[in-house]
Image (cartoon, rainbow, N blue to C red):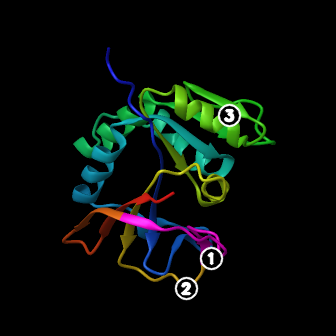
């Protein structure tokens, strides 16, 4: 009998060196990955079967659904295809419908429902956005953290982790890029 793959919940983020996903003006244009970084992003996203988003992160990601792929680089088109093929769950009390396929809205983030989703999944899950990720981290739902650090200091904005979080991590992998980006991958120790 084939053994069931234990699905992981992965928090992946691109952050400034001082720990922000967006600067104080809400901009993250400084975080655009170069083709080499984007290639690793794609590789890490291949095992993802479901994305969990808060409303704001969903709105940032939704354009990948309708972006024309003609004329795009291979890495950009590949990411769009991966994203479109995955299921999405958006946690929002203000959205009643979505503009993307394979997407459902949940009014409340229920840790037990996420545990059940992980247990039933045959592929990994990804959680996007620091607010939603903070809730998952607080309930010990996150199994792995994948962090891309950008060689930029923005001085303030939207932090990628909450202030009061304590986690012990095990380094699984690290990689440096010519652009100055650094990727680190950690397993969350329970």
Q: Is residue 125 visible?
A: yes
The reply to whether callout 1 and callout 3 are in contact (CB within 8 Å) is no
**In magenta stretch: residue 52:** no
In the image, what residue occupies the spot 43% across and 26% down?
A: 122
In the image, what residue occupies the spot 51% across and 57% down?
A: 190
Apparent side of residue 147 relative to residue 90 in the rendered image (left or right) = left
Marks 1 and 3, how far apart in space? 33 Å
Q: Of 26 and 167, which appears nearest the observer?
A: 167
- Return the residue found at the far top: 1
Marks 2 and 1, how far apart in space? 8 Å
Image quadrant containing the N terminus: top left
Q: Secondary structure at mark 2?
A: loop
Residue at the spot of label 2: 155
Q: Is residue 162 above or below residue 80?
A: below
Residue at the spot of label 1: 24
Which of the two discs, 1 and 3, sits closer to the camera?
3
On the image, the x and y values in percent for residue 4 come to 39, 25
Which of the two discs, 2 and 3, sits closer to the camera?
3
Dot 2 or dot 3, earlier in sequence: 3
User: Is the residue marked by circle 3 packed among few (<14), some (14-19), or many (20+) residues within 10 Å?
Assistant: few
Apparent side of residue 114 relative to residue 40 in the rendered image (left or right) = right
Residue at the spot of label 3: 113
Marks 2 and 3, how far apart in space? 37 Å
Task: Please report the bounds of the magenta region as a residue range.
Answer: 157-170
On the image, the x and y values in percent for residue 161 come to 58, 68
In the image, what residue occupies the spot 67% across and 55% down?
A: 135
Q: Is residue 53 above or below residue 21?
A: above
The reply to whether callout 2 and callout 1 are in contact (CB within 8 Å) is yes
Dot 1 or dot 3, earlier in sequence: 1
Q: Secondary structure at mark 3?
A: helix
């Amino acid at each position: 009998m084939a053994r069931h793959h234990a699905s992981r919940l992965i928090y992946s983020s691109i952050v400034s060196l001082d720990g922000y996903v967006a600067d104080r003006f809400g901009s993250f244009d400084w975080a655009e990955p170069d083709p080499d970084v984007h290639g690793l992003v794609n590789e890490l996203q291949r095992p993802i079967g479901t994305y969990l988003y808060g409303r704001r992160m969903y709105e940032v990601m939704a354009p990948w659904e309708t972006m024309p792929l003609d004329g795009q680089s291979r890495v950009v088109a590949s990411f769009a295809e991966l994203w479109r093929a995955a299921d999405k769950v958006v946690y929002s009390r203000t959205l009643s419908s979505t503009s993307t396929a394979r997407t459902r809205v949940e009014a409340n983030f229920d840790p037990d429902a996420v545990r059940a989703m992980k247990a039933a999944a045959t592929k990994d899950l990804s959680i996007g956005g620091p607010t939603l990720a903070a809730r998952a981290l607080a309930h010990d739902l996150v199994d792995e953290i994948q962090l891309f650090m950008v060689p930029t200091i923005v001085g303030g904005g939207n932090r990628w982790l909450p202030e009061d979080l304590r986690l012990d991590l095990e380094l699984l992998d690290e990689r440096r890029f010519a652009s100055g980006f650094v990727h680190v991958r950690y397993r969350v120790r329970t």
